[in-house]
């Protein structure tokens, strides 16, 4: 993948780079082998990637600062799709809220079963103003972000986030780092309608998305920089990636995670033990 990005960086403009993307991918047989498992096949994926790259416009809300970083996100996103792209997506708010396979994070939090932190999406003007003020404080108590629109997630993802939070806390304790309240989750399950809304606002909200089938989460990372906790959290995430347990995408302020299918059974068992089910 690095060679593909480096090839694009050689081009003099983003337009030329987008045009060169198909050839750069086709020259990487290891990438082609991965894309061949995609529901749309390698050629279909390449066509989609070229179109996405040609339409990319950098903006403050995008998780990619330039075309090269956007292509990196696009390529890593295909791993999510290869794993979970054939799963039914939640089309609307009601389909997320009524899904029996999703756990209620508020209930789990009240029962003391969560090791990570999150906040609900602000639904009133007063809460939005309060959060705006909080973000301007020199040492904010929580990372920037709108909060969870749907505090619901698959049990396996809840357990994965719990384990990541525990690993992060242990790492901070070992190196004497301020954990700033621990791991904060910015996003879990989304509806397709909300994903489209985020895309319309300029966010890199791709489709199909593991968020829309309940198999992805975003974890706040860059807000931990003042204490050095960001590097500790990155190390926790990358070690799990290197063991083949998760796909990890650096999206700047937050990192995206998606559990591998092979990890789901162990996560499901661990969650049941944790909550006594």
Image: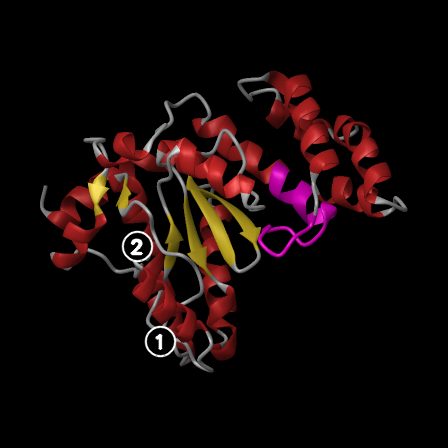
**Coordinates of residue 97 in the picture (x, y in percent):** 24, 36
Q: Answer whether residue 14 is visible to the viewer in this image.
A: yes
Q: Residue furthest left?
A: 276
Name the residue beneath numbered marker 1: 173
Residue in the foreground of this view, choosing between 130 and 67: 130
| Residue 10 left/right relative to 224 | right
Q: Viewer-nearest of labels 1 and 2?
A: 2
Magenta segment includes 67: yes
Q: Earlier in the sequence, mark 1 or mark 2?
A: 2
Name the residue beneath numbered marker 2: 123
Q: Residue furthest right?
A: 12
On screen, residue 30 above or below 67 = above
Q: What residue sits 46% from the left and 71% below the top?
A: 229
Q: What residue sits 47% from the left and 39% below the top?
A: 197
Residue in the foreground of this view, choosing between 211 and 91: 91
Q: CA gap, disc 1 to disc 2?
A: 36 Å
* Residue 184 figure quarter: bottom left
């Amino acid at each position: 993948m690095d060679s593909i990005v480096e090839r694009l960086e050689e081009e003099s403009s983003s337009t030329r780079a987008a045009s060169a993307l198909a050839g750069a991918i086709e020259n990487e047989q290891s990438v082609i082998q991965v894309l061949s498992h995609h529901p749309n096949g390698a050629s279909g994926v390449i066509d989609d990637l070229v179109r996405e790259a040609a339409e990319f416009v950098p903006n403050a809300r995008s998780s990619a600062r330039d075309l090269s970083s956007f292509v990196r996100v696009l390529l890593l996103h295909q791993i999510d799709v290869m794993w979970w792209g054939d799963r039914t997506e939640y089309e609307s708010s009601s389909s997320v809220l009524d899904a029996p396979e999703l756990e209620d994070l508020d209930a789990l939090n009240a029962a003391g079963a969560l090791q990570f932190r999150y906040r609900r999406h602000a639904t009133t003007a007063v809460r939005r103003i309060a959060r705006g003020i909080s973000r301007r404080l020199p040492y904010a108590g929580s990372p920037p972000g709108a909060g969870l629109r749907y505090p619901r997630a698959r049990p396996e993802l809840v357990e994965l986030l719990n384990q990541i939070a525990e690993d992060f806390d242990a790492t901070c304790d070992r190196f004497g780092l301020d954990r700033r309240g621990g791991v904060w989750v910015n996003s879990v399950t989304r509806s397709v309608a909300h994903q489209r809304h985020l895309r319309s606002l300029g966010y890199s909200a791709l489709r199909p998305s593991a968020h829309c089938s309940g198999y992805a989460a975003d974890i706040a990372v860059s807000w931990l920089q003042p204490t050095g906790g960001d590097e500790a959290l990155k190390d926790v995430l990358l070690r799990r990636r290197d063991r083949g347990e998760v796909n990890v995408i650096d999206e700047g302020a937050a990192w995206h995670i998606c559990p591998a299918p092979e990890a789901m059974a162990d996560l499901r068992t661990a969650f049941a033990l944790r909550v006594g089910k």
